[in-house]
Image (cartoon, rainbow, N blue to C red):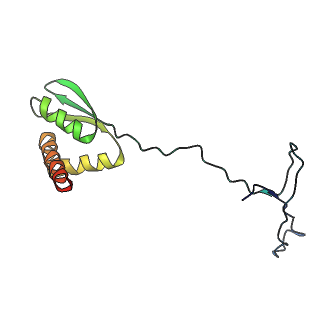
Amino acid sequence: ESLVPIAAGKHPKPFRTRKLSPPAPMILPAGAGGKVGRCQAFFISLQINLPRRSVMELWVRDGGKVVKYQGSLKKVFEELLSSSSGSPEILAFNGTKRERRRFKRELRKAGKNVLKAADNYLKWYKSCKRLFN
């Protein structure tokens, strides 16, 4: 594969739709630019798709104070269970699309009880780990 500019002709009349003869490669002088019909350059995207690290954030009101939990969904639920004193009220949450869907699903199953949702998720997570280990 070579990145060679390709000559492209113009249609003789704008209303004609017949195909032109296949374009031939053009050799340009080194270092000289110029406007050529098309170029067979393949542009490489500068965006690098690295695996994104999952960071979920959950803000709850627990006993009159606002608490922020941050990390993976598992870590957030573990911290929530270990440190909550009553029934925390969800203020906001943010995460990847998968985490948001999972979080909402667990809340629906638990009747919007955050502690019960966290407990259910952790039980499910442990059962899955047991199956694959």
Residue at 9% x, 31% y: name it.
86
| 8 left or right of 103 in image | right
Residue at 84% x, 74% y: name it.
16
Question: Toward which corner of the image does residue 17 lie, by quadrant?
Answer: bottom right
Percent x, y for residue 119?
A: 12, 43
Viewer-proximal residue among 63 and 6: 6
Viewer-proximal residue among 9 and 2: 2
Q: How many numbered circles are shown?
A: 0
Question: Toward which corner of the image does residue 13 lie, by quadrant?
Answer: bottom right
Quarter of the N terminus within the rendering:
bottom right
| 21 left or right of 2 in image | right
Viewer-proximal residue among 55 and 1: 1
Residue at 29% x, 37% y: name it.
93
Percent x, y for residue 30?
A: 87, 45
The residue furthest front is 133
Residue at 87% x, 64% y: name it.
9
Percent x, y for residue 123?
A: 13, 48
The residue furthest left is 86
| 115 left or right of 2 in image | left
Percent x, y for residue 15?
A: 84, 72
66 versus 2 height, above or below: above
The residue furthest bottom is 18
